Amino acid sequence: MTTADAQPALPTTSATADSRPMPDARLTTGAPATGGAPATGGARRGRRALGTAGYAATQTVLLGLLFMVYRFGRHIVDGHQTEALSHGAAVWQMERSLYLPDEAAVQRLALHSHHVTILINEFYYAVHFPAAVALLVWVFAWHRSAWPRARNVIIIATGMALAIHILYPLAPPRLLPMTMTALIDTGAIFGPSPYAQGDGFANEYAAMPSLHIGWAIIEAWVVVTALRSRWRYLAIAQPVATTAVVVATANHYWVDGIVGALLVLLAVQVTRLAPQARIVAVMRLMVTRRSDTCGSQQPS
């Protein structure tokens, strides 16, 4: 008998038994076959909604703190009326030396119609802050990818504006002698005026720069960059109309708008990816050099 003949024959039924599919535990226990998927999907949606709500809350708190700091900071220049009026006269004379258009000429155009005068006062009083809030809600809800940069541009531009408000208090042209400017305070005469409410928020001596114009430019920039429709360029009408309104109501000089636009341009450039990458690279290089210096000073 050979070695091959001595080996016992393997059972022929084991392979067949092992190859049979195992019964589904969900079928044998009575659990629904698709019961796990809805629960997993629902939990995922719940976590996503909770994360969105938490992120929205943190962003609201952040912008609320910015608003409070801005509100408090503007009133640091309270009590500097004489200085602010002196700066106003200097800005007025500078504009004349630069041959900028006369603000009084723009105001005279509006004063031809009582209804137009009321309309521009309403625009100055009621559009500025609600338009900024509406933009933030719109970007956060429907264009989330544009949110971080839009938020950062507003924070940076507003922060720089606040610094200028503190360092250079400036009275608006409507508070300068009419014999100098030939301008009137349309809000005080025809109404409404944000400075007649006595709520302690508005500071009349923080004209430089104009955040009415600055924020309007940001709003137009966000709409133009976030949308792809050819109609998006209509948003440019917002800063154009705002500039005409703040000048016609004698609340700002041309220079206030120019400085506000330059601050927005600077904030937009700072928040670009390339400058951010360079800043991060420089910071990392500084940290690395500092670490190498500290390491070389340690005793061996």
Image (spheres, helix red, strand yellow):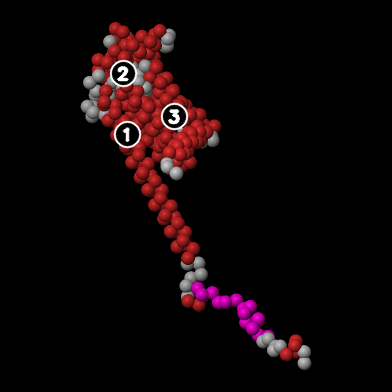
The spot of residue 215 in percent (x, y) is: 40, 28
> Could you tell me which residue is drawn at 29 percent across and 7 percent down?
179
- Can residue 283 be seen here? The reply is no
Q: Earlier in the sequence, mark 1 or mark 2?
A: 1
> Please, what is the three-letter code of the amino acid marked with disc 3?
Ala
Separation of marks 2 and 3 at Cα, in angstroms: 23 Å
> Please, what is the three-letter code of the amino acid marked with disc 1?
Phe
The spot of residue 221 in percent (x, y) is: 47, 30
Q: Residue furthest bottom?
A: 1
Q: From the image, tell me which residue sits under label 3.
A: 267
Q: From the image, tell me which residue sits under label 2.
A: 170
**Magenta region: which residues?**
12-27
Q: Nearer the viewer, residue 185 or 200?
A: 200
- Asked if 298 appears above or below 26 in the picture, the reply is above
Q: What element does badge 3 sit on?
A: helix
Separation of marks 3 and 1 at Cα, in angstroms: 18 Å
Q: Is residue 198 left or right of residue 66?
A: left
Q: What element does badge 2 sit on?
A: loop
Q: Nearer the viewer, residue 232 or 86?
A: 86
Q: Is residue 241 left or right of residue 232?
A: left
- Asked if 19 appears above or below 89 in the picture, the reply is below
> Please, what is the three-letter code of the amino acid marked with disc 2?
Leu
> Could you tell me which residue is drawn at 38 percent across and 27 percent down?
160
> Could you tell me which residue is drawn at 46 percent across and 61 percent down?
40
> Could you tell me which residue is drawn at 37 percent across and 13 percent down?
103
Q: Please say if the residues under marks 3 and 1 sit with CB atoms less than 8 Å apart.
A: no
